[in-house]
Amino acid sequence: MLKHWRELFDTVQSAVGGTAEQDNHRLQLATAVLLIEIMQSDSGASEIEVTTVERLLRERFDLTADELAALMSLARTRQETAHDLHAFTSQLHAAFDATAKQRIMEMFWQVAYADGKLDDHEHHLMRKLGDLLHVGHAAFIGTKLRAATAQKMSSEPPG
């Protein structure tokens, strides 16, 4: 399956359009690479951040365990070799409307907050991603607040 993902990515990486399945895989890969970039932007990936990325990808794209494992493996490789984020953010910007991009930003914030803290590198990266996705300031802050509130609520002991 990983071979399939790699071949698919190689053939459609710079292509415009393609089949619906190719477009969907390209968007999944771009999203996964950016989530991994956020996960790695502080002192490295904690277990909770990895779990959060996997949960978000599985839920957002309705992936099986095998599909998720293949996507994560390829996304890690692409993230390690990427020279910039523009190739990935431009795909998401072109494919999604403002509401969908806000949902993606909220996913990004969930990873940034997954370990219970937001460091300067993560915050800088989040601002950069918001700009590259053309998410307006009010929407950017809204996604940040929703993710922070959700993280706080999930970490509080039952009362």
Image (spheres, rainbow, N blue to C red):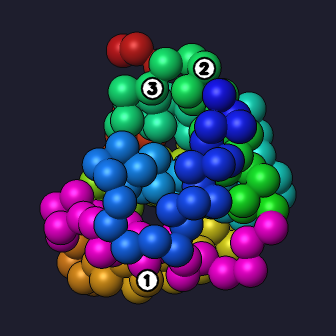
- Give the residue type at disc 3: Leu
In terms of image quadrants, where is residue 71? top right
- Number of on-image labels: 3
Q: Which residues are magenta?
A: 81-101
What residue sits 52% from the left and 74% below the top? Answer: 14
Q: Which residue is mark 1?
A: 132
What percent of the width, then of the height, locates residue 154? 43, 29
Q: Is residue 88 left or right of residue 46?
A: left
If the image is split into quadrants, where does the N terminus sit? top right
Give the answer, above or below, for where 113 lies relative to 12: above
Q: Earlier in the sequence, mark 3 or mark 1?
A: 3
Give the answer, above or below, for where 21 lies relative to 137: above
- Give the residue type at disc 1: Leu
What percent of the width, then of the height, locates residue 28? 46, 48
The residues bearing labels 3 and 1 have C-alpha atoms spaced at a distance of 26 Å
Determine if the magenta segment contains residue 154: no
Residue 113 in sight here: no
> Dot 1 surroundings within 10 Å: few (below 14), some, or many (20 or more)?
some
Foreground residue, 35 or 77?
Answer: 77
Helix, strand or loop for disc 1 = helix
- Give the residue type at disc 2: Asp
In terms of image quadrants, where is residue 121? bottom right
Foreground residue, 116 or 101?
Answer: 101
What percent of the width, then of the height, locates residue 131? 41, 85
The overriding secondary structure of the stretch rendered in magenta is helix
Q: In the rendering, which numbered label is found on residue 66?
A: 2
Q: Which residue is mark 3?
A: 63
What residue sits 32% from the left and 52% below the top? Answer: 19
If the image is split into quadrants, where does the C terminus sit? top left
Q: Answer yes or no: do the residues labelled 1 and 2 have beta carbons within 8 Å?
A: no
Between disc 3 and disc 1, the foreground one is 3
